[in-house]
Image (cartoon, rainbow, N blue to C red):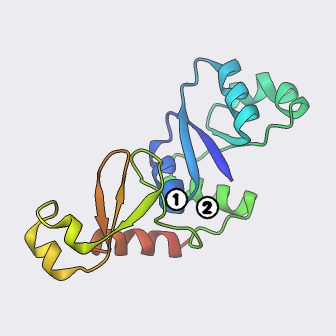
Amino acid sequence: MEFIVDLTMGKLVKWLRIAGYDTIFYNSVKLDKIMDIASKEGRIILTRNSGFIKKERKVLEERGIPHLLLASDSVEEQLKKTANYFKLDLKESSFTLCIDCNKPLIHILKEDVAGKVPEYVYQKYNEFVHCENCKKIFWRGTHRERMEEGLSVL
């Protein structure tokens, strides 16, 4: 599943990407463009904008664009409602996308990260992934453990 998410829900975008779901932002000013992108790319619209849903519900239904109105300000509640509504597995593909640019993460050899990560990280960890788009390197550190815990409580 792929999502297009209201610009006001940046934390939800991050968590959907952590869970491995291709997710992009939309600018709520251009509603026609949002629906075109969702329709062409097969994306699900997630929004907190009840006016958008009320105004465009008929068009969304006619065009077969799945959508979900999220009322909560809490990212935990937003993610829980989205996962339950669309029956998402938040763990199956987790940590496969870059949380910053939404591109696939690729395994990289330990020797290829020498000098690109802190020395203590290089010494402690053996497995690394990187994003070819933004060049960031990731490893299974305490930050990832906290994210895994966040996904498991839902």
Q: Which mark is residue 150?
A: none
Q: Residues within 10 Å of mark 2 (few under 14, many from 20)?
A: some
In the rendered view, does 5 fall on the left or right side of 130?
right
In the rendered view, does 144 fall on the left or right side of 114?
right
Which quadrant of the structure image shows residue 70? Answer: top right
Q: Residues within 10 Å of mark 1 (few under 14, many from 20)?
A: some
Closest to the observer: 128 or 83?
128
Residue at the spot 65% in from the left edge and 69% down from the top edge: 89
Mark 2 element type: helix
Reading the image, the residue beneath label 1 is: 76
Closest to the observer: 91 or 80?
91
Residue at the spot 45% in from the left edge and 69% down from the top edge: 150
Indicate the amino acid at tag 2: Lys
Residue 29 vs 41, above or below: the answer is above
Reading the image, the residue beneath label 2 is: 80
Closest to the observer: 52 or 147?
147
Mark 1 element type: helix
**Decide: marks 1, 2 in contact (CB < 8 A)?**
yes
CA gap between label 1 and label 2 equals 6 Å
Which quadrant of the structure image shows residue 154? Answer: bottom right
Indicate the amino acid at tag 1: Glu
Residue at the spot 24% in from the left edge and 73% down from the top edge: 110
Residue at the spot 61% in from the left edge and 37% down from the top edge: 48
Q: Position of residue 73 (x, y in %)?
A: 52, 46
Which quadrant of the structure image shows residue 142? Answer: bottom left
Q: Position of residue 135 (x, y in %)?
A: 29, 50
